[in-house]
Image (cartoon, coloured by chain):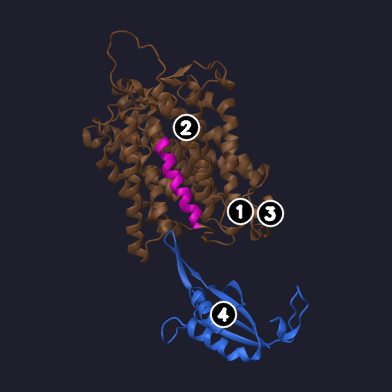
Chain colours: A brown, B blue
């Protein structure tokens, strides 16, 4: 199984790079113009409206933007602890729920520390050959209290991006739970943040090669969700199946609470990715809510049709699928687009977790791949079709006369999948060699809460 | 003296308690229980996969009574614990055991005085 997956991933990787080089030569002349506007959306959206070409704009702190971004940053933090922790913890078995919560919690702490030491500078430092940032901002070196990123203090931008990195790593844990050693998870978190998240975040948001190519990813369809989803799938294949398969949720009330907190925090995630208190933040806000509600309904109806019952876990899962799918599109599409994205995400993600997973037999326990990997891919791809220049001049999709955008999106998706798959395989081989991946069957039977932590939920 | 153990549907607990208080049986112990019987189980659906749940949730009552209270007590439980006029599979069972002795901890009273 692992060998087959390996071969498939390598083929995907090669194809992605071929597509990339072909695409690069084809769009090289237009991409140069696109760079400035698109990159400015990611780094300094206050300049999205074409600035009058009189004098070079002087960066000025905007208190409205700053206030919003402080709040948005705190909202995104809430998504990991306790949002994701409760969402995942409630679906886990009763004997494993604390361990699942601990995985999200410890990851947020680890990433918080690594991010200010070297994470931020490698992802958002000055570009080195389109691949990675430099180390000039190691330990926040050179970032003073009055240093600005766009119209907000750079220190706020640092923490805002930190919360994205943390939840991305934590998302993958959903595929690993109920059997992975806690030490293996800690080591994985460190390695995966360093060697997968940081480069990919740099490529898309840190003025790296995908940004220069013109890939549209408003709040993290590729960087966050495809990335975490692929890591989830690879990890699930490495870890193998649990001895007690199936879902036996210990507390769906906690899961729904977690889903609600994710939805709430996601307003900070998506509307905050405008990096300003402006109209694009407003568009991202309404799109986030619309697509999420639509996806929850779509999942519920699909499930009602196939399983004869509309489940509450289905409503919550559909909502998360919608949140995931609208993420790359939030600041680019109109509400019609967000309805389309929500509907497709709800139906397709349901089919992935209900039919495809059991067909292939991988044990993606909480469907991190089925929801985040697939939902993220749907969103990233559909952004290439539905991006409406009336919403955001930086993005123009196929339906608005720019078919090249779909190709660029495919390149971004393929590159992310290929790179992530290969590096995650290497990381799992390292973790396996250093601390081992799985707990013993006895520890698994007793439950991770007791065997790993000596506690009870 | 008899010791009555009744397994009933959790949804019938309130009406059983009500019926018992009408015949002046006020002392009982209630426990959440799970079990397998003729009712089989049910299926639960999580993310499109159906899971067979064999253990069904039940409520277990324990009541110690003096002999003259035995028949009224089991009559009250039987009436109140049925779901629907005819009752249904899964409505539960009553076990009646001889009770050797009872001791009230506070006063050290013994036997039927202590019930």
Q: Earlier in the sequence, mark 1 or mark 3?
A: 1
- Nearer-the-camera pick, B16 or A360: B16
Q: Which mark is residue A179?
A: 1
Assess whether mark 2 and mark 1 are in contact (beta carbons under 8 angstroms). no
SS at badge 1: loop
Q: Nearer the viewer, mark 3 or mark 2?
A: 2
Q: Which mark is residue A451?
A: 3
Q: Nearer the viewer, mark 1 or mark 3?
A: 3
Q: Which residue is mark 4?
A: B7
Q: Which mark is residue A73?
A: 2
Q: Position of residue A33 (x, y in %)?
A: 30, 20
- Horizontal side, residue A105 vs residue A356: left or right: right
Q: CA distance from mark 3 to mark 2?
A: 35 Å
Q: Nearer the viewer, mark 4 or mark 2?
A: 4
- Horizontal side, residue A174 vs residue A328: left or right: right
- Horizontal side, residue A360 vs residue B103: left or right: left
Mark 1, Cα crowd under 10 Å, few <14 / some 14-19 / many 20+, is many
Q: CA distance from mark 4 to mark 2?
A: 53 Å
Q: Main secondary structure of the magenta part?
A: helix
Q: Nearer the viewer, mark 4 or mark 3?
A: 4
Q: Which residues are magenta?
A: A252-269
Q: Nearer the viewer, mark 1 or mark 2?
A: 2
């Amino acid at each position: 199984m692992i060998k087959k997956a390996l071969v498939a991933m390598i083929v995907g990787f090669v194809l992605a790079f071929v597509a990339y080089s072909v695409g690069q030569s084809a769009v090289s002349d237009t991409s140069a113009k696109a760079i400035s506007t698109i990159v400015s959306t990611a780094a300094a959206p206050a300049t999205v409206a074409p600035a009058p070409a009189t004098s070079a704009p002087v960066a000025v702190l905007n208190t409205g933007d700053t206030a919003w971004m402080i709040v948005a940053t705190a909202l995104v933090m809430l998504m990991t602890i306790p949002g994701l922790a409760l969402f995942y913890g409630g679906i886990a078995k009763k004997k494993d729920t604390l361990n699942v919560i601990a995985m999200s919690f410890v990851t947020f702490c680890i990433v918080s520390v690594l991010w200010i030491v070297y994470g931020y500078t490698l992802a958002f430092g000055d570009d080195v050959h389109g691949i990675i940032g430099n180390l000039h901002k190691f330990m926040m070196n050179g970032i003073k209290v009055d240093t600005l990123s766009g119209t907000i203090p750079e220190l706020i931008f640092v923490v805002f991006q930190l919360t994205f990195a943390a939840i991305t790593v934590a998302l993958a844990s959903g595929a690993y739970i109920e059997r992975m050693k806690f030490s293996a998870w800690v080591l994985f978190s460190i390695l995966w943040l360093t060697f997968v998240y940081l480069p990919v975040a740099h490529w898309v948001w840190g003025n790296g090669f995908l940004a220069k190519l013109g890939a549209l990813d408003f709040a993290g369809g590729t960087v966050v969700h495809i990335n975490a989803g692929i890591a989830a799938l690879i990890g699930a294949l490495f870890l193998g199946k649990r001895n007690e398969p199936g879902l036996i949720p210990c507390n769906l009330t906690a899961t729904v609470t977690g889903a609600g907190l994710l939805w709430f925090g996601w307003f900070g995630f998506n509307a905050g990715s405008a990096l300003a208190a402006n109209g694009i933040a407003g568009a991202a806000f309404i799109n986030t809510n619309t697509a999420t509600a639509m996806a929850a309904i779509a999942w519920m109806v699909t499930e009602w049709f196939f399983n004869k019952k509309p489940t509450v876990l289905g409503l919550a899962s559909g909502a998360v699928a919608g949140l995931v799918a609208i993420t790359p599109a939030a600041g680019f599409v109109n509400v019609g687009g967000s309805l389309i994205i929500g509907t497709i995400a709800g139906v397709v993600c349901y089919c992935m977790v209900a039919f495809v997973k059991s067909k292939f037999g991988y044990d993606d326990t909480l469907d991190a791949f089925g929801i985040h990997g697939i939902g993220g891919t749907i969103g990233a791809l559909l952004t290439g079709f539905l991006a409406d220049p009336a919403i955001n001049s930086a993005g123009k999709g196929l339906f608005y006369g720019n078919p090249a955008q779909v190709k660029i999106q495919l390149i971004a998706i393929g590159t992310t999948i290929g790179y992530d798959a290969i590096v995650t395989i290497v990381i799992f081989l390292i973790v396996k060699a250093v601390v081992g991946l799985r707990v013993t069957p006895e520890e698994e039977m007793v439950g991770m809460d007791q065997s790993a932590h000596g506690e009870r939920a | 003296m008899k010791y009555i153990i009744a397994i009933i549907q959790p949804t019938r607990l309130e009406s059983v308690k009500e019926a018992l208080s009408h015949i002046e049986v006020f002392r009982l112990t209630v426990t959440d229980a799970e079990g397998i019987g003729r009712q089989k189980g049910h299926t639960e659906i999580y993310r499109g996969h159906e899971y067979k749940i064999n253990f069904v949730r039940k409520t277990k009552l324990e009541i110690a009574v003096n002999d003259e209270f035995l028949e009224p007590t089991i009559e009250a439980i039987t009436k109140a614990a049925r779901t629907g006029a005819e009752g249904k599979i899964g409505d539960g069972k009553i076990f009646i055991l001889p009770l050797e002795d009872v001791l009230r901890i506070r006063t050290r009273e013994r036997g039927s005085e202590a019930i």
